Image (cartoon, rainbow, N blue to C red):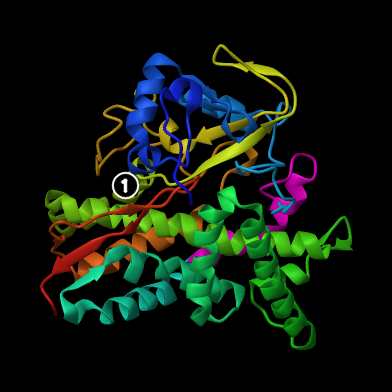
């Protein structure tokens, strides 16, 4: 991605792809919450940015004025690449979402837990003897990639290819429409081949499941099927990869939390919710389709709105000690998985993957730390997480 022009005033000229945002957006959001709780920029053809929990919630629930037809903010005019149900509005949204629910129920995800633990241990086996690894690259990026590959029924050896697509869409794809379009074509070609293979040899995987679904008695159109598969692949990897990486970064820096989790394993459920709250990776966008006022600000039709769910999670009006990781926090109604009708359908899966990844890491590597002079590399755009977390430990 090219060098960004400087931001002089975040209230009037914010840029969610700027390195300062990537390195520490919370400082920016705290300042905006105090000075200008709804910021605006003329970049990207005009975008609003609310940073208070209640304003973010109001917009997320208001599907009459704020549409999900566009959920990304790009430099160039967007390329049509729907990913239902995330890019669908009522009334189309509900049947598209309901169709997916059986694959993501607590019971369905519980069946994946043993194989997820096995995958985590296989990954740890690969580096534990070295006494060092990149917790993001060597571990966190692989866990959700392998799990979603297993669910979809695609070859797990394609993991590097999948992660490269994510890098391109969040990197050059933001500025270069040809890169964005090429990646979408590559993903669709990949899934067309998988679909064709199942027509001659049906499989009981997630692709096969979707191929058999209908809406209003009609089978899914090809573009609907391809868009949903893009969603499951990309969102299923990028978000959880970021959550696991950020949690391990925190634990590497905070030995007292590692020791407490080891001494009090019953804390793990509340700790996982707190890691999800404090290290929430995802912001989303909405298209203003009708003029509306929220938080004392008029939102003009045709512009975009960026909803930073991580900012909602650290609003002091909503949470006590919002910037602290409180392992035993009891009241924790965070917005990490979104708000409104588009709340993440994969929340059960993400919770399980994060919990199992942390549990198995701490069981095998209870004492680890960030390597001296380590340089962290943060992803840019709407999904934020550390892409490089070099750690050292005693080799086993």
- The residue at 67%/75% (across/down) is 190
For the record, the magenta segment spans: 85-109
Write the residue at 59% across / 38% down. 285
- Residue 243 versus residue 297: which sits nearer the camera? 297
Let me know if residue 346 appears in the view: no
Relative depth, front residue between 44 and 202: 44
Residue 289 is inside the magenta segment: no
Q: Residue furthest right?
A: 217
* Residue in the picture at 80% in, 40% down: 91
- The magenta stretch spans residue 88: yes
Relative horizontal placement of residue 293, taking residue 264 as reference (left or right)? right
The residue identified by callout 1 is 270
Q: Residue furthest top?
A: 296
Dividing the picture into quadrants, the one containing residue 266 is: bottom left
Kind of element beneath mark 1: helix
Coordinates of residue 6 in the picture (x, y in percent): 42, 33
Q: Is residue 273 above or below residue 29?
A: below
């Amino acid at each position: 991605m090219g060098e960004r022009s400087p931001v002089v005033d975040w209230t009037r000229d914010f840029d969610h792809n700027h390195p300062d945002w990537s390195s520490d957006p919370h400082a920016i959001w705290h300042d905006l919450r105090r000075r200008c709780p709804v910021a605006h920029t003329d970049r990207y053809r005009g975008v609003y940015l609310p940073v208070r929990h209640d304003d973010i919630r109001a917009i997320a629930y208001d599907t009459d004025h704020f549409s999900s037809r566009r959920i990304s903010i790009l430099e160039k005019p967007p390329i049509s690449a729907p990913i239902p149900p995330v890019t669908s509005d009522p009334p189309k949204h509900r049947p598209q979402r309901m169709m997916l629910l059986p694959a993501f129920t607590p019971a369905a995800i519980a069946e994946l837990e043993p194989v997820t633990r096995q995958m985590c241990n296989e990954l740890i086996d690969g580096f534990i003897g070295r006494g060092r690894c990149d917790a993001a690259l060597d571990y966190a990026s692989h866990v959700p990639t392998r799990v979603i590959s297993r669910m979809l029924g695609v070859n797990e050896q394609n993991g590097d290819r999948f992660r490269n697509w994510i890098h391109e869409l969040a990197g050059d794809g933001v500025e270069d429409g040809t890169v964005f379009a090429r990646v979408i074509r590559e993903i669709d070609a990949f899934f067309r081949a998988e679909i064709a293979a199942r027509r001659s040899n049906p499989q009981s995987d997630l692709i096969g499941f979707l191929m058999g679904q209908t809406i209003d008695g009609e089978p899914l159109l090809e573009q609907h099927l391809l868009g949903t598969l893009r969603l499951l692949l990309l969102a299923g990897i990028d978000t959880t990869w970021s959550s696991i990486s950020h949690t391990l970064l925190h634990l590497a820096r905070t030995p007292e939390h590692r020791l407490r989790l080891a001494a009090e394993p019953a804390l793990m459920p509340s700790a996982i919710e707190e890691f999800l709250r404090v290290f929430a990776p995802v912001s989303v966008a909405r298209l203003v389709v009708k003029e509306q006022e929220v938080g004392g600000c008029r939102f003009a039709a045709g512009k975009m709105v960026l909803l930073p769910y991580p900012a909602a999670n650290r609003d002091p009006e909503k949470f006590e000690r919002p910037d602290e990781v409180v392992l035993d926090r009891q009241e924790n109604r965070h917005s990490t998985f979104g708000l409104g009708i588009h709340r993440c359908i994969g929340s059960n899966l993400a919770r399980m993957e994060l919990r199992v990844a942390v549990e198995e890491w701490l069981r095998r590597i209870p004492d680890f730390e960030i390597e001296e002079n380590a340089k962290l590399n943060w992803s840019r755009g709407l999904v934020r997480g550390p892409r490089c977390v070099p750690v050292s430990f005693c080799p086993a």
